[in-house]
Amino acid sequence: MLVVHHLSDSRSHRILWLLEELELPYEVRRYERNPKTRFAPPELKAASPLGKAPMLEDGGRRIIESGAIIDYVIRRHGGGRLQPDPASPAYDSYVQWLHYVEGSAMLPLMLLTYANRLGKAAAPLLPRIEGEIANHLGNIDRALQGRTYLLGEELTGADIQLSFVAELAGSMGKRAEYPALDAWIRALQQRPAYRRAVEKGGPYGLAR
């Protein structure tokens, strides 16, 4: 049985959604953020080496990092679903998107999250951070223009992985000026599997 260690309002929602798309049986172990600090609880530290979610257990294996988990689940349990043929050029684009999300696109959004907590002290950094956010959201928006999904007309794990970037950007009020990106995430949020993941994972404040 696959076990997902899931933290409220976090990247781990993507893993629940992935498993729902694949209709795989799994167990959810839920952890709630501290309402004041928004940090994960100590119980998650006892389960995960970094005290962060998601973490996937599959038999004796424990896997962290969303991209690695998505890749693992699709390769080992997907039966060819949610990824292009590995022999095709589309597969290379798929892998690039999987790595791009956390390797590049998430960094300026996370920097803005922390900068906002610093207040005036962060003012010198904000133009650079805002510029990089616009750079990445613009890149994604252009890639989605004229397409239903990142790689064309079929949903892949890359769409699931990238969804958190769009949702976090939306929570910061930075998505409306990117119409292709906004339409894409809103359509993804209407998928039955996405909605089932919210039901199983609990309230998800980024689903906006």
Image (cartoon, grey):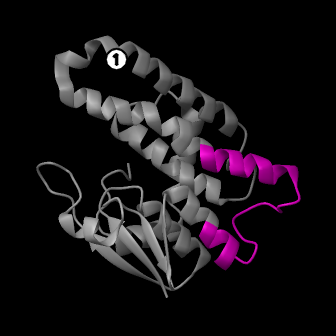
Q: Main secondary structure of the magenta part?
A: helix
Q: Nearer the viewer, residue 42 or 80?
A: 42
Query: Circle 1 — which element?
Result: helix
Q: Nearer the viewer, residue 149 or 136?
A: 136
Q: How many marks?
A: 1
Question: Residue 110, located in which quarter of the rendered image?
Answer: top left
Check the image and report above or below for 62 versus 151: below
| Neighbour tally class for label 1: few under 14, some 14-19, many 20 plus, Cα within 10 Å | some
| Residue 87 as seen in the image, left or right of residue 155 | right
Q: Position of residue 136 (x, y in %)?
A: 55, 29
In this view of the protein, can residue 183 be seen by the observer? no
At 21% from the left edge and 59% from the top edge, which residue is drawn? Answer: 33
- The residue most toward the left is 36
Q: Position of residue 63 (x, y in %)?
A: 50, 68
Check the image and report above or below for 181 versus 15: above
Say whether residue 75 is magenta: yes
Q: Amino acid at mark 1?
A: Leu
In this view of the protein, can residue 49 be seen by the observer? yes
| Residue 185 as seen in the image, left or right of residue 42 | right
Q: Position of residue 85 (x, y in %)?
A: 83, 63
The residue that disc 1 covers is 126
Question: Residue 103, located in which quarter of the rendered image?
Answer: top right
| Residue 177 as seen in the image, left or right of residue 46 | right
Say whether residue 142 is magenta: no
Q: Which residues are magenta?
A: 72-99
At 66% from the left edge and 39% from the top edge, which residue is drawn? Answer: 144
At 60% from the left edge and 37% from the top edge, which residue is drawn? Answer: 180
